[in-house]
């Protein structure tokens, strides 16, 4: 299986409909998690189906919170992908602290609203206590379809709120924390601080998972580590910065346009104007990152070569250090390899 085929499988999702001009897609991992939940609730299939329905609905409303916040801030949002660790709202909003903060916080606020409603309805029956926490025993008084649904509503949204407010990328809490620091420290310094905090949070989650034998939390820690590395790499490649709304896939638009230019001339104009899909944007971003890395490497090679050649001019080949000689040999070999056949 080729890397391209693996990436297609990893990113595969399918459309399920539109809400308020927002395309809703479901990632295959969410279906896999639904099967896991059914297994967990195998002794009570009705409760398992309720858990799946409420989980999917809560994640969907969470992502709509991001989308409507982006529109309220003058941005746009036209697609949501629901997956096992939450969702991905394709939002574009001005790259300034306040709009970014508002868009990031509104997802968790939706979950807070849902669990608050559930607690308000259930508190006369169950009181307000530890039953709201997902890891506590099921409350004895919560029997019957209605009460069970409300308890699940509270617990699922409590879990989503706590999960998303962890101050680490790529979670909402990381974006909220970064936006809050951004206003005081500037974009770059706030980004570096948040990335470091993300790695710390991942380590703490992994330690807790080890001590409590919570296998799922290991995947959460890995998810945070990958997200932090991606943010750091995107920043190093110049794909992140303060200014007008311009997400990473848009900053690699040149790569996308080059690919699009190769299509048949009889493509419809309307088709040409469509924004690329999630996979196309991901591929364009990867291509742009690869191109930027190679450009930076060549620039550094050229700079170092100029320095060594200047040394040769001053002191001759005999005056070069072993490191400089080795570099000169490597640079010469690379240049020879890049010559076209027949060149001398």
Image (spheres, rainbow, N blue to C red):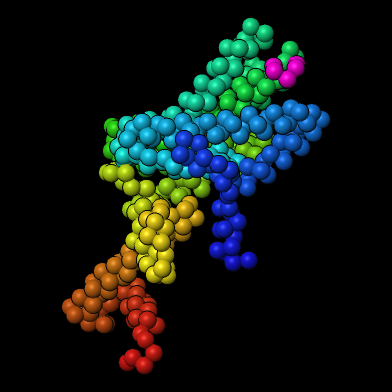
Whole-percent x and y of residue 15? 56, 46
Compared with residue 276, is residue 335 higher up or lower down, i.e. above or below? Answer: below
**Splitting the image into 4 quarters, where does residue 324 fall?**
bottom left
**Splitting the image into 4 quarters, where does residue 284 fall?**
bottom left
Task: Tell me if I can see residue 300 in this picture.
Answer: yes
- Residue at the top extreme? 124
225 inside magenta stretch? no
Which segment did they paint magenta?
143-147
Task: Tell me if I can see residue 173 in this picture.
Answer: no
144 inside magenta stretch? yes
Whole-percent x and y of residue 60? 54, 34
Compared with residue 310, is residue 33 higher up or lower down, i.e. above or below? Answer: above
Give left or right: position of 162 versus 142.
left
Whole-percent x and y of residue 339? 35, 85
Whole-percent x and y of residue 156? 61, 27
Residue at 63%, 66% in the rendered image: 1
**Splitting the image into 4 quarters, where does residue 40 fall?**
top right
Give left or right: position of 40 versus 59.
right
Residue at 61%, 34% in the rendered image: 56
Compared with residue 23, is residue 270 higher up or lower down, i.e. above or below? Answer: below
Quadrant (top left/top right/bottom left/bottom right) for the C terminus:
bottom left
Q: Main secondary structure of the magenta part?
A: helix
Please state which of residues 250 and 331 is positioned toward the viewer in this rendering: 250
Compared with residue 120, is residue 11 higher up or lower down, i.e. above or below? Answer: below
Q: How many marks?
A: 0
Give left or right: position of 53 versus 270.
right
């Amino acid at each position: 299986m080729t890397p391209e085929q693996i990436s297609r499988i990893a990113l595969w999702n399918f459309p399920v409909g539109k809400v308020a001009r927002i395309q809703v897609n479901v990632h295959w991992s969410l279906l896999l998690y639904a099967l896991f939940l059914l297994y967990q609730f195998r002794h009570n299939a009705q409760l398992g189906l309720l858990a799946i329905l409420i989980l999917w609905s809560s994640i969907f409303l969470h992502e709509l919170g991001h989308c409507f916040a982006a529109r309220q801030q003058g941005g746009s949002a036209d697609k949501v992908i629901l997956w096992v660790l939450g969702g991905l709202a394709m939002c574009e909003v001005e790259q300034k602290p306040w709009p970014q903060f508002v868009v990031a916080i509104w997802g968790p606020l939706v979950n807070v609203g849902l669990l608050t409603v559930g607690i308000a309805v259930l508190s006369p029956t169950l009181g307000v206590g530890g039953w709201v926490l997902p890891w506590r025993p099921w409350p004895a008084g919560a029997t019957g379809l209605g009460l069970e649904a409300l308890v699940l509503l509270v617990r699922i949204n409590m879990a989503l709120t706590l999960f998303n407010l962890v101050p680490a990328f790529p979670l909402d809490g990381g974006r909220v924390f970064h936006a809050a620091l951004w206003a005081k420290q500037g974009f770059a310094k706030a980004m570096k601080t948040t990335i470091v905090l993300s790695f710390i949070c991942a380590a703490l989650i992994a330690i807790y998972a080890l001590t409590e034998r919570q296998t799922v939390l290991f995947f959460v820690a890995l998810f945070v580590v990958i997200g932090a590395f991606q943010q750091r790499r995107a920043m190093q490649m110049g794909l992140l910065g303060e200014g007008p709304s311009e997400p990473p896939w848009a900053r690699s638009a040149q790569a996308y346009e080059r690919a699009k230019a190769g299509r048949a001339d009889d493509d419809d104009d309307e088709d040409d104007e469509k924004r690329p899909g999630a996979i196309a944007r991901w591929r364009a971003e990867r291509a742009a990152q690869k191109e930027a890395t190679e450009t930076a490497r060549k620039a550094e090679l050229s700079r170092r070569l100029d320095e060594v050649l200047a040394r040769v001019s001053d002191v001759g080949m005999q005056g070069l250090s072993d490191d400089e000689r080795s570099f000169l040999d490597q640079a010469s070999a690379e240049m020879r390899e890049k010559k076209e056949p027949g060149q001398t």
